[in-house]
Image (cartoon, rainbow, N blue to C red):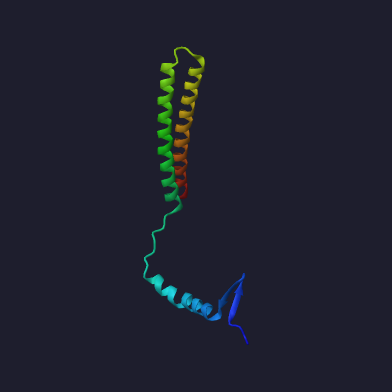
Amino acid sequence: MKSNLIKLKGVKISTKAVLVLILFSVFALPILALGYQVAPTVGIINALNKIVNWVYTFFFFVATLFIIIAAYYFVTAQGKPEQINQARAFLLWAVIGVIVAILARGIVLWLQETIK
C-alpha cells in the first residue's frame, strides 16, 4: 500500500496538507494582502537622522551630568590633587561627549547635503 505521507526531517506530513498549503499560498494570500495598507517606508537618511537625534540628546545629557560632577569635585577638592585630577577627567570626558555629539550631527547633515 502506498503511503500518502512526506517525511521532512523526521516529521511526517500528509500530501493533502501540503497541497492545501500550496493552494492557499498561491490563491488566498495575495487576496488577503490586498486588504492591508502598505506601511510607510522610512528612508535611510530619515532613520539615521532619528537615531542621531537620540544620540545627540543622550551625549549632551551625559555631558551636562559630567560637568556638574566635575564642578562638585572642583569645589570640594580643597587642594587635594587626586580630587582635582578626577574633576579634570570628568570635564575632559564631558568635552569629548559634546564633540562626539556635534560630529555625529554634522556627519548626518553632511550626508544629507551630499546625497541631495
Residue placed most toward the observer, 115 or 103: 103
Question: Relative to residue 40, is residue 9 depicted above or below?
Answer: below
Q: Position of residue 68 (x, y in %)?
A: 40, 25
Query: Considering depth in this image, is 112 or 41 the residue closer to the camera?
Result: 41
Which residue is located at x 43 percent, y 33 percent? 62
Vertical placement of residue 64 versus 42, above or below: above
Residue lying at 46% horizontally and 32% vertically, measured from the top left: 97
- Residue 90, how many percent across, how many down? 47, 25
- Residue extending furthest toward the bottom: 1
Question: Could you say where residue 115 lies in the image, as x and y percent from the top left?
Answer: 47, 50
Can residue 61 be seen? yes
Looking at the figure, which quarter contains the N terminus? bottom right
User: Residue drawn at (42%, 25%), measured in percent from left and top?
Assistant: 69
- Answer above or below: position of 86 versus 39: above
Q: Nearer the viewer, residue 9 or 50?
A: 9
Q: Nearer the viewer, residue 64 or 46?
A: 64
Q: Which residue shows up at 42% across the image and 38% down it?
A: 56
Residue 100 picture location, percent across and down = 48, 35
Q: Quadrant for residue 37, please give it.
A: bottom left
Q: How many marks?
A: 0
Residue 116 in view here: no
Residue lying at the far top in this picture: please name it: 79
